[in-house]
Amino acid sequence: MPTLRGVTLDLWRTLMEDSQEVGRARFQYRMTGIQAVLAEKGVAVDSDALRQASRACFRACEGIRGLERELSFHDQVDLFLNLVEPGLATRLPDVAKGRIRDIYGCMPSPHTPTLALNAVHVVQTLREQGYMLALISNTGVTPGTTMRKLLADLELLPHLNVLVFSDEVGLVKPAERIFHLTLERMGMAPHEVVHVGDHTKADVFGGNRAGMWTVQVETQVEREQVAEPHVRIPALADLPSALERIQRGAVALAPAQPHQ
């Protein structure tokens, strides 16, 4: 029977939930703040231009993520500024750029995500059962530095032994290397660890490819199922029982499926 020692967890839609309404309000807060800083420095940019630059930045970053790579947070902000106005990232004073970075990656109250139902109880239970816990997160716009503060505020941070954020390591799920980097920091082999997440490609395919066990939390309906998890669960609260199934040998560790 397998001996599981660790669990790696996805963040968005697994441990944390966000809504389109909250996301839109957060985006507007950030754009308004950036517009004000730029105006102070004599750069007049209207709201539509900022939104267009943000969309263009998102598309460029998605192209890089398609190669399983990630820009650093500072490089992403520089890209955004240069899309607002060519050369702007170089011309702005460092203090102003620092203020823009703070706004670009902030998580302002009340426009913050919330914990998934039972998230704290589940991670506490797993720690009490002796599992080492790690987080593997594709960060998008909000950097790892911001997410650490939010995880601390939500009382999750003390339960997580290892944190890996894509903007800090230059890799995104489903890159095999981001999983192996996490395993190295945990000091564990792939067959000793279960990866838990909601996304079929990023979490299931990525975890399978790395040789790990995978559990998929079915929080969203996906049109394309590019890989099969070892176990599916309807909610995070079912994770302890899923791990127990794996531990007693009720699930086989099948080889990773090829990405279609």
Image (cartoon, helix red, strand yellow):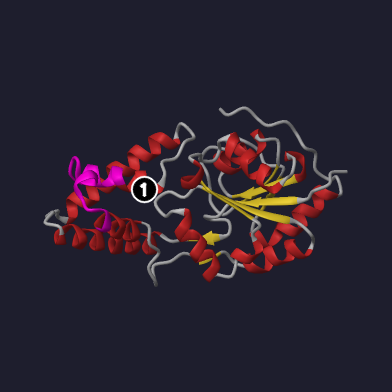
From this view, report whether residue 235 is shown above or below residue 186: below
Residue designated by label 1: 74
Q: Residue at x 28, y 61 (%)?
A: 28
Q: Residue 111 at x, y = what percent?
A: 39, 67
Q: Residue 98 at x, y = what percent?
A: 31, 57
Q: Could you tell me what secondary structure mostly forms the magenta stretch?
A: helix
Residue in the foreground of this view, choosing between 147 and 48: 147
Q: Which residues are magenta?
A: 78-95
Tag 1: residue type?
His
Q: Is residue 129 left or right of residue 164?
A: right
From this view, report whether residue 97 is shown above or below residue 184: below
Q: In which quadrant of the rendered view does residue 210 lie?
A: top right
Q: In which quadrant of the rendered view does residue 209 lie?
A: top right
Q: Is residue 202 left or right of residue 86?
A: right
What is the residue that sits farthest to the front in this orientation? 94
How many badges with numbers are in the image?
1
Quadrant housing the N terminus:
top right
Q: Residue at x 32, y 48 (%)?
A: 77
Residue in the foreground of this view, choosing between 96 and 76: 96
From this view, report whether residue 55 is shown above or below residue 39: above
Q: Residues within 10 Å of mark 1 (few under 14, many from 20)?
A: some
Q: Secondary structure at mark 1?
A: helix
Q: Residue at x 21, y 61 (%)?
A: 37
**Residue 89 lies in magenta, yes or no?**
yes
